[in-house]
Image: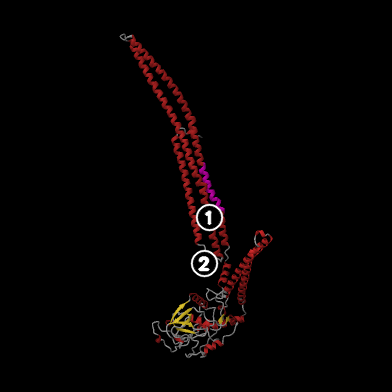
Amino acid sequence: MSWGTELWDQFDNLEKHTQWGIDVLEKYIKFVKERTEIELSYAKQLRNLSKKYQPKKNSKEEEEYRYTSTRAFLATLNEMNDYAGQHEVISENMTSLITGELTRYVQELKQERKSHFHDGRKAQQHIETCWKQLEASKRRFERDCKEADRAQQYFEKMDADINVTKADVEKARQQAQLRHQMAEDSKAEYSSTLQKFNSEQHDHYYTHIPNIFQKIQEMEERRIVRIGESMKTFAEVDRQVIPIIGKCLDEITKAAESIDHKNDSQLVIEAFKSGFEPPGDIDFEDFTQPMKRTVSESSLSNSRGDGKSEPKFGGKSKGKLWPFIKKNKPPPPPPASASPSAVPNGPQSPKQQKEPLSHRFNEFMTSKPKIHCFRSLKRGGAGPEDFSNLPPEQRRKKLQQKVDELNKDIQKEMDQRDALTKMKDVYIKNPQMGDAASVDHRLAELGQNIEKLRLEVQKFEGWLAEVEGRLPLRTDQARRQSGLYEAQNTAAVNSCAQDRESPDGSYTEEQSQETEMKVPATDFDDEFDDEEPLPTIGTCKALYTFEGQNEGTISVAEGEMLYVIEEDKGDGWTRIRRNEDEEGYVPTSYVEVYLDKNAKDVYKSLQKISE
């Protein structure tokens, strides 16, 4: 079926139809363009979502991703990022293969359509011109025929009239002949024009218009084929990324299947295991008979007030029952606004003053035996180099990690040394390539670095061996001794407020001495070393003279400069030191304190460790 033969008289409708076809194509282009924008927006939102839940660098979240469940979640985030990338690929391919191509094709289609309909209008104008010429020739022939008839009638009338002269009759005859000749000429012209028009009209409707409409039909069919191909491309672009998207989903499924609840549970043990042994059984204390309690009879109970015994298990001290040796605290100081003369000099009973944990910690730090793990604490750092502030198991992990890092650094340095050695050999064999002596300095540096790193490895391996030597399971006998020792030390901690008070309320030093005498010697004693003085956390200047007559206080003179080893914890006293043998408490209102920030941070770290 051809538009040229079937639609020869539908020029205007074809013009409207082809314009509608272009509008449909432009509408489809707009649809694809909006789809690409949606894909880009979706990909951007997916990337932002993945980025939002990614672990932040150097944060606690990074440590959480050692568990299989959180690693699976991280893999899901990474796959979602790749998933978003595939939607970006869809957008890019649709833009290049559909939107861009169809936009260029629409411009070409509009030009072609314009050309075809211009030719059609030109052919239509030509046939209309031929028709007008035919009509003019026809009217002229009709007019000349009428004029010839009138001239003939006039001649016949003049010829029949006897009153008309021969000259007039002859003139009328000649006029009639002229009009007949003009009619014949018009007839011939009309006949010729008619034949020409019929020929032009036949060519117009059977040749020119069919050719033009055929071209328009082909143009329209190409448009339809092109939009169909674009729709196939639309689907193919999506189909091309389906395997990759499928792989992303498969990786997410694989990550989910890799979750191991047993492994995560083991990681929790490795993360929080302290390595300490559970405390032993608590001995029964019989209060029915008045007797002097010793360390072996003491427990975690606190028997002040009405004499009721309530075992106390401190949350932070459980499992770390260090021995605290009691030192008396001075009585509470006067208010800051009080004058120096208002400070009482007479001793007060330690029962009236409740000791804060910070004082007990400082007494523990200055008492014997002293915990071994504080020996290597760096004065100005955030923690000890040997990680002795950590529980045994955590310390072992940190030391092992440090050893592994140092071994990696050694391997890197050795690789560089090997490379430089090869380079030196090349320079020796081919002096024109470089000076062999130029790498000697660098080789020496690498040798020194390797030696330093090896010394570091030996140091940390020594600490690691020390920790691993303590971690193996002990015998039942040693465990019982450990439990007894911890129970005794717990009793010493909880009874530190009344360890110098006898059962009848009198104040004595004998029980403290007896406690020290009866602590059994176990393997735990190896963890202690000689006493070291507390680190100073600042300096102070005495504003007034203070006569320290109570036990635990120290006398100072106005204007004297001293070291601060414990700041005021809200009880009105500051602990200071004059030299290695003289230290004690003074009222905070009597001194002006200048704290060292770094030293204060170390003190707080020590306080947390003791808790």
What segment is highlighted magenta in the picture?
Answer: 225-243
* Left or right: 21, with 472 as reference point: left
x%, y% of residue 152?
36, 14
Q: Is residue 179 above or below residue 547?
A: above
Amino acid marked by disc 1: Gly
> Which label was assigned to residue 85?
1
Q: CA distance from mark 2 to mark 1?
A: 27 Å
Q: Is residue 14 above or below residue 251?
A: above
Q: Is residue 463 above or below residue 152?
A: below
Question: Along the line of sight, which residue is nearer the eye, 349 or 564?
Answer: 564
x%, y% of residue 42?
49, 55
The quarter holding residue 487 reads: bottom right
x%, y% of residue 49?
49, 59
Q: Look at discs 2 and 1 and give the one toward the viewer.
A: 2
Colour approach in the figure: secondary structure
Total marks drawn?
Answer: 2
Judged by its main secondary structure, the magenta piece is helix
- Does label 2 or label 1 sit earlier along the sequence? 2
Q: Are marks 2 and 1 in contact (CB under 8 Å)?
A: no
> Which label was assigned to residue 59?
2
Q: Residue at x 55, y 50 (%)?
A: 239
x%, y% of residue 509?
51, 89
Tell me, yes or no, if residue 305 can be seen here. Answer: no
Instruction: Report helix, strand or loop for mark 1.
Output: helix
Amino acid marked by disc 2: Ser
In the image, residue 230 lies in the stretch drawn in magenta: yes
Instruction: Report helix, strand or loop for mark 2.
Output: loop
In the image, residue 42 lies in the stretch drawn in magenta: no
